[in-house]
Structure formats: C-alpha cells, structure tokens
C-alpha cells in the first residue's frame, strides 16, 4: 500500500473546550478510531500535534503500521501549517489528510477518492455545498506546495487549494460510499459532540 496518511491533531479545540483527539467515543479516543481506520490502508501514518509524543504513543503501539510523530513548526497556526510540517516526512506519492474533527472515516470513501487522483494534485469533495479540503487525497507534490505557500505567509487552506490542479467530487458520488456523509461530519462544539454520540454510539 503506497499511501501516506496525515492526521492533523494540533488544533486548539477552542470551541470544543477539550482536545478532540482524546474525546471518547465507543470507549476509545477519536484519534484511536482514526488510526484504526487508516492503518490497514496506509504504509505510514504521520501525526502532527503540539503536545508531548508520550500522550499519543499508546494509541498506535499495537497497530501494524509505521507511525511518524511531528510537532507543528508554527503551533496553532491552522491546518495548512500542519500539512506544511509534513512535507519532508511524506514517503509516498499518494497522501490522505485526516482531521481529528471526524472520528469516523469510511475506508470506501478513501478508496474511491484515490481512484480519482490520477492526473490531479488533489480531489476535493463538495458536501453540503462546501468544499471539503480535509479527509481527502492529494499528491506529494501538493504537500510540497503547501510548505512553500505557508512559508510565503499564507495560512488558509483555500489559498493552497487555489494553487493546485484539483478535481471536485459531487456529494451524490460520496453518498454512494457514505450514505450518512459521516466522513465529513465535523465536530467543533460540545453540542456537535453530544449529538454525534447519541446518533452513532450504538
């Protein structure tokens, strides 16, 4: 499997009030759920965070995958910073970028998006009429561009996306593999979290 997966775990979680990577769901932290999904489809996983590695390490030690742990170059400067931080660590040409906002990622969605990556630097789903620049796939070249754009002072994901040759994927195509669009259910507040737990805990 020649896929590198990046997990962005360095956000402030200011609206949630708690680190989303460690929010419990079905007896496991969000980050563990994401790791369990990505390990079977990745040859390496790169976690980008701002806290001590020892807090995260127990979550992957029993998984059969190579894990690299990086500290954000510019802590709390947004997801583009996290992506830029990984540019020298990514080993494969194909890259999946995950966020700790969404603990359930459908492997079927990842596989589908990868089939669309040929000839493009990124594949961007449009869900609920919004571009979804995370929980989707890119090339290593796109990751390198993220670094150069961030170093020029740009901080927004869309500033990066606009510099890439990307393919947009319609919501109806994602629905074929993820009928509840759970891969793009971003949880940002305690209310989001409680609603999610009530809906998917059982």
Image (cartoon, rainbow, N blue to C red):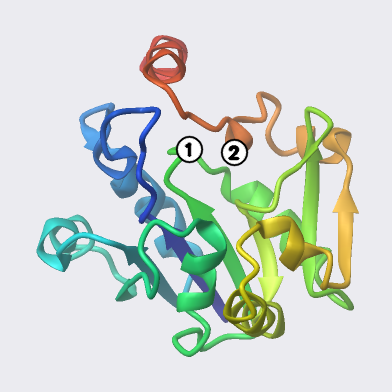
Residue at 80% x, 69% y is: 117
- Say the numbered circle drawn on residue 90: none
Q: Would you identify the image quadrant in which residue 120 lies?
A: bottom right
Above or below for 37 versus 117? above
**For residue 197, what is the image quadrant?**
top left
Q: Which residue is drawn at 33% across and 38% down?
A: 20
Task: Say few, some or many: other residues with alpha carbon within 10 Å of mark 1 (under 14 / 14 to 19 / 20 or more).
Answer: many
Judge left or right: residue 105 versus residue 200: right
120 sits to left or right of 47 = right
Q: Which of marks 2 and 1 is nearer the N terminus?
A: 1
- Residue 11: percent from the left, percent from the top? 39, 49
Query: In the rendered view, would you say 64 is above or below 132?
Result: below
Residue 178, above or below 152 = above
**Number of numbered tags placed on the structure image:** 2
Horizontally, residue 95 falls left or right of residue 122, namely left
Q: Mark 2 points at which residue?
A: 183
Front one among 133 and 26 = 133
Residue 30 location, x and y as percent? 33, 40
- For label 1, the SS is loop
Please tell me which residue is depicted at 65% across the width and 68% down the height of the picture.
Answer: 154
Tell me the quarter of the image containing the N terminus: bottom right
Front in this rendered view, residue 95 or 19 = 19
Q: Choose between 169 and 75: the one closer to the eye.
A: 75
Q: Mark 1 points at which residue?
A: 104
Marks 2 and 1 close (CB-CB < 8 Å)? yes
């Amino acid at each position: 499997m020649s896929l590198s997966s990046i997990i962005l775990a360095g956000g402030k979680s200011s609206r949630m009030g708690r680190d989303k990577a460690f929010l419990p769901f079905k007896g496991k932290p969000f980050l563990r759920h994401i790791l369990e999904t990505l390990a079977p489809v990745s040859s390496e996983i790169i976690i980008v965070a701002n806290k001590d590695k020892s807090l995260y390490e127990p979550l992957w030690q029993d998984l059969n995958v190579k894990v690299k742990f990086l500290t954000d170059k510019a802590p709390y400067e947004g997801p583009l910073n996290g992506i830029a931080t990984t540019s020298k660590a990514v080993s494969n040409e194909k890259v999946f970028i995950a966020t700790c906002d969404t603990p359930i990622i459908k492997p079927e969605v990842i596989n589908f998006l990868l089939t669309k990556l040929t000839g493009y630097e990124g594949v961007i789903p449009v869900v609920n009429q919004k571009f979804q620049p995370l929980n989707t796939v890119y090339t290593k070249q796109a990751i390198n561009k993220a670094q150069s754009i961030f170093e020029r002072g740009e901080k927004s994901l869309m500033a990066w996306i606009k510099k890439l040759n990307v393919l947009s994927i319609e919501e109806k195509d994602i629905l074929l593999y993820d009928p509840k669009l759970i891969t793009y259910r971003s949880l940002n507040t305690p209310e989001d979290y409680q609603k999610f737990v009530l809906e998917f805990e059982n």
